[in-house]
Amino acid sequence: MVKLKSNDDKEFEVEEAAVIQSEMIKNMIEDGCATSVIPLPNIDSKTLIKVIEYLNKHINMGKAAETGEEDDLKEFDEQFVNMGWEELFDVIMAANYLNIHELMELCCQSAADRLKNKSVRAVREMLKITNDLTEEEEQEIINDAPWAFEGPEIDDTVN
Amino acid sequence: MDKKLVIAAVDVIASNTDILCEILVRLPASSLIRFSAVCKLWYSIIMSMPFRIHHSRCLAFANALPPTGIYFYNCLAKVQNLESLSLTDNVSSLPPLHDELTTSTAIGGDVVEVIDFKVTQSCNGLFMCILTERSNTSTSRKGLVYNPVNKFRYVLPTCTVSDEWEYYNLISYPEPPYYKALCATYLAGGNLGVSSMGLYMLEGDSWRHCGSMDATGHGFDSGVFWNGAIHWIGVYFSVYFVVSSEEVGRIELPMAPRGPCNQKLRYFGESGGHLHLIRVKNLYAKKFIVLELDKDTLTWSMKYRVHLAKLISTFPEMAQQTPSGTQYAYSILSLIRGEMEEDSVLLLTIPGKVVTYNLVLKTVNVIRELPGEVHDTLRFDHLSSYQYTASFAPGEDWTIDPK
């Protein structure tokens, strides 16, 4: 068992087999740097719980293919990314920091799927981005490829 | 209580280039063109060559993506333009093709006018087109590789081995520039009744001979890239050229459905990594099967059984009474495999409409109106439409040195 500590001082015990899906922790263990508790100063307990839930579910991924649990895992992944933007970004930050390739992939794909059909305005609002382009610059971008800015699929809602 | 931290994560990602790239690279090129207007940081990421190369590479490896849309020749319109077709509301808008390609250019006082252009293949966001140009002195026919998203255009060098017609094919390739071009042309001096096809691969600015094959009874204007090879369909078998090994071969076709009609081929095309073939016993058959080629055994087997009875009862104008019996007016534009099996559809033209016929659920959706005479519905064929996925290919900075 490996002990992880979130930045709000909560400790979690995780099986080594599960936790080494994180390249970062795997390297720490291999280098003998993971003696008692591994502090994770960038991750809060709420996010860490999500990450551990993912690690535990995916621990037997190799076996899943053999036992026909692939669909089960797919369903879990779909449910897993069913969270708000802020939560999703927290998990992406944590996955990036811990270097968990599959989790990063899953969450970034989910973020991309949500953005795909959004309007420029909706993206700015969802991600709280300030537009620093001048009106002329923005118009120039639109004029260069007007087809990309029109179409029934473009969604102006923020969610 | 976590509100402050949480907002911070959104802020961090929106301005963290590495993580932002990880998300953006998973978006279709058409969305990215739009999102370049979000802010300066996004603009600079999306416009940068490393990002575009990365994006092209990801797309080249994800070969099972459903298309972002269809371009098709509306042979009912007065001017035969290539029109774009959105399949559902979820499909992105498509860049225009026609205007960009038919602009005349002036080269040293000699005005070159494009008098005709025809798309012959679509692959990886790139189109293979045949341009017919007329200048003051001559008329010439050229192959052109074109990407409407970044307006990349590359005029293929002429492959001057014979005076025969040249057929150009696009090959999706997982390394920059993410495409290769193959030229097939009839070789002179074949025995009586036997024609031989020479194959040439584009390398730099010239064509290298890479093989030849017996060409009897094959339509070389409809090469399809699938599973690392170009396939050309014939009557009794198809022939192919494997890009990596430069091996040529042929695949037996199952017996065609018996019937009075000579032209049995209704569809031959690739979608989502699957190669499909539809042959019918006659032009107006309301039942037919869709065959799929197995990657490992290279044998054809039945994938879908199609019965258009429900479609015909919904659109009774499809049934035409003729002296030789009832006939059904429709043609097959395309077969599109969805991400999910139950999203797989046939795109059909019927009198006055383009519809999708779901191959699994057997449901029908009207995609758009298509004004024209009933008989015109039959004028479309499988060479009328091209599935398209927007990309930034070739990804490299071709604007600095187009050669």
Image (spheres, helix red, strand yellow):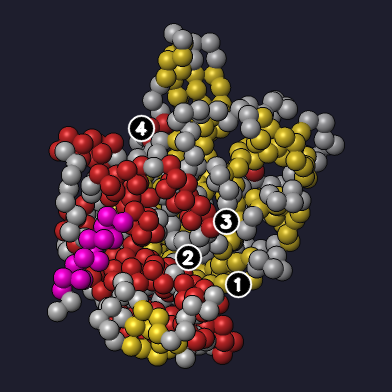
Depicted B368 relative to depicted B137: above or below:
below
Q: Residue drawn at (38%, 25%), measured in percent from left and top?
A: B103
Q: CA distance from mark 4 to mark 2?
A: 30 Å
| Residue on which the image places disc 2 | B337
Q: Is residue A110 visible?
A: no
* Most foreground residue, B295 or B319: B295
In the rendered structure, which segment of residues is drawn in magenta? B3-16
| Residue on which the image places disc 3 | B268
| Residue on which the image places disc 4 | B99
Q: CA distance from mark 4 to mark 1?
A: 41 Å
Q: Position of residue B107 (x, y in %)?
A: 46, 14
Mark 2, Cα crowd under 10 Å, few <14 / some 14-19 / many 20+, is: many
Label 3 is found on which chain of the structure? B
Q: CA distance from mark 2 to mark 3?
A: 14 Å
Tags 2 and 3 on a common chain: yes
How many numbered marks appear?
Answer: 4
| Residue on which the image places disc 1 | B302
Q: Residue drawn at (45%, 24%), measured in percent from left and top?
A: B114
Going from N to C along the chain, the mark reached first, 4 or 1, is 4
- A60 on left or right of B249: left
Indicate the secondary structure of the residue bearing disc 4: helix
Tags 4 and 2 on a common chain: yes
Indicate the secondary structure of the residue bearing disc 1: strand
